[in-house]
Amino acid sequence: MLHCSLLVVEAEVNSIWEQILPLPSSHKIMLVSSTFFTYDEPQMSPANEQKNEESSTNTTRGVIWETLRYVLIAALIIIPVRTFIAQPFVVEGLSMYPTFHNRDYLIVNELAKYEGDYHRGDVVILRYPLDTSKYFIKRVIGLPGETVTITDGTVTITSPTITTPLVLSEPYVKNPKADSSARTLSQDQYFVMGDNRAQSSDSRAWGPVPKKLMDGKTLVRLFPLTQIALHPGSLASFGVSPE
């Protein structure tokens, strides 16, 4: 109905203009178009809507793919590092007190277990020989082929190459125990003890540790923040030279 009314108006307007300013039929002015867009006509074609939906889907897929790609890259970096190079370790108990406290957070250098590079005085992480699912933190005292003799708490080392008994200087021991024992190690064994001699379960109780159960050396202490250190518990930190 509205469309018909507008056509009538258009005809009347054109008639008035012909009376005022006659023009050839080829120059008649069309003031109102005979074509209208109804208000309920879609302003976007179905094809455009489909393109926008496809664009949105592609964007979502792109975000998911980028996220997965970064997760994969992170995994490829982190898993080998944690498996073969460095591993976190949380101290439990007081067998190494006061060098290490309960809940100290450490990073362990695991390359040492592949290199077999252990020295007297190193603080190491090892698998408990009587239950290899458990991990202990101890200090290396005796090396392969040596004889470790403990007399009233004083440690002495002898071997085919150490003919004069080597008496260890142990400033890290603050809670000694006056016990006595002796043990000769095979070529793949280490003798380990905790710095807290009076409260440590170690090689004095369950024997030497096979090399294959040595699981790395302490590299960094990250917690507590006030005690962050590189090579925590090392002989150098006590002013002692390796023997």
Image: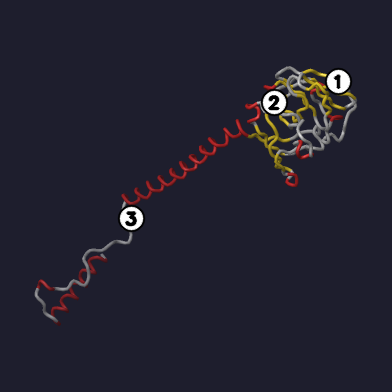
Residue drawn at the location 41% of the way across and 48% of the way down = 56
Label 3 to label 2, Cα distance in Å? 71 Å
Q: Which mark is residue 44?
A: 3
Q: Earlier in the sequence, mark 3 or mark 2?
A: 3
Task: From the image, tell me which residue sits under label 1.
Answer: 181
Q: Residue at x 50, y 41 (%)?
A: 70
Q: Residues within 10 Å of mark 3 (few under 14, many from 20)?
A: few
Label 1, secondary structure: give it: strand
Up-down: is 91 above or below 27? above
Q: CA distance from mark 1 to mark 3?
A: 92 Å
Q: Is residue 146 left or right of residue 113?
A: right
The CA distance from mark 2 to mark 1 is: 23 Å
The amino acid type of the residue labelled 3 equals Met
The amino acid at mark 1 is Ser
Q: Are marks 1 and 3 in contact (CB under 8 Å)?
A: no
Task: Name the residue: 77% across, 30% down.
Answer: 243
- Residue type, numbered disc 2: Met
Q: Quadrant of residue 186?
A: top right
Q: Secondary structure at mark 3?
A: loop
SS label for mark 2:
strand
- Within the image, what quadrant is residue 126 found in? top right
User: First in sequence: mark 2 or mark 1?
Assistant: 1
Q: Label 2 crowding class (10 Å Cα cut-off): few <14, some 14-19, many 20+?
A: many
Q: Is residue 201 visible?
A: yes
Which of discs 1 and 3 lies nearer the camera? The answer is: 1
| Residue identifier under label 2 | 214
Q: Nearer the viewer, mark 3 or mark 2?
A: 2
Q: Kindly identify which numbered label has been placed on residue 35.
A: none
Q: Position of residue 193 (x, y in %)?
A: 80, 27
